[in-house]
Image (cartoon, rainbow, N blue to C red):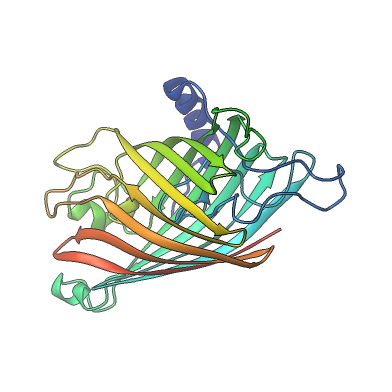
Amino acid sequence: MRLPSFASRLAGGMLLAASMFGAATAQTAPAATEPGSGFSNKLLLTGGVTNIEGAAGGGLTPWAVIGGYGTRDEVGGGAFVTGIRFTDYTFTSAGASIGLFNRVELSVARQTFDTRRVGQALGLGSGFKFHQTVLGAKVRLFGDAVLDQDSWLPQVAIGAFYKNNDRDQLVRAIGAKRDSDMEYYVSATKLFLFESLLINATLRLTRANQFGILGFGGGKNDDYQLMPEASLAYLLRKDLAIGAEYRRRPNNLGIAKEEDAYDVFLAYQPWKHTSITLAYVDLGNVVIKDNQRGVYLSLHVGF
């Protein structure tokens, strides 16, 4: 697995994203009761869960929140594991993140895509697996999704992912132009506490094929494209939320049409430091198989 000069690429990528998008970052949390007290007034679930790439947010898309329970004087973080069983494939992701002073989030995730019996049909062998490592960074620019209840201003953040796929020769053989790439995004998150409603919108610059599992770029297109993503969540009570997400994706490869992704989810936080997310996910066509739908289950532990 190659992780070439990630620090310099990510730093440069963050500056590029800032110049392209103008501004962005945010976190959803009140200040701690006392600086350094070790206690946080962050409301349950308002910091989101963990998306499949390791960033705080929904399952499919990052939000402008900073992961962990740390406030402006503290460091927080967490770890997660996610599994999705589709009709013909299985996807897992596990990783961790750290939130620095309610301003910066750093994350890492390791993803595995199991082709199961489809691998044999593709000539790869039954149960053939793709692996991808995702390194992420997010910066809150302005706004506070929880505290700014007297303003329509959302919390805004910019972020970047560096993705590295360990199947270089194979993804190129199916038409991808590269096995690793950068993605850039800006997210805006607004929480309406009295209405128990959270709304998030994300714009992502990407050329990933199936989230990067099948490499980046292809014969149909090898340019970055701006893809919209959205999340809507309703808090049934302080520890339970329902919602839905949408993620538009580029269609770069000639071997198969890539379709947009959707999910509907239920997020439950039985204890302050633990959340469980159950979702129904629809990816549409994945290579030679249509109607790839399945159950998403994620466990997140934070501090």
For image coordinates 60% across by 50% down, the residue present is 46
Q: Quadrant of the N terminus?
A: bottom left
Residue 185 located left or right of residue 260? right
Q: Is residue 190 above or below residue 255?
A: above
Q: Residue 153 location, x and y as percent? A: 55, 27
For image coordinates 16% across by 72% down, the residue present is 123
Q: Residue 233 location, x and y as percent? A: 47, 51
Q: Residue 141 location, x and y as percent? A: 59, 28
Q: Quadrant of the C terminus?
A: bottom right
Q: Is residue 164 above or below residue 158?
A: below
For image coordinates 46% across by 41% down, the residue present is 200
Report how many numbered discs are placed on residues in the image: 0
Quadrant in the picture for residue 162? top left
For image coordinates 41% across by 39% down, the residue present is 182
Q: Nearer the viewer, residue 303 or 169?
A: 303
Q: Residue 164 location, x and y as percent? A: 41, 51
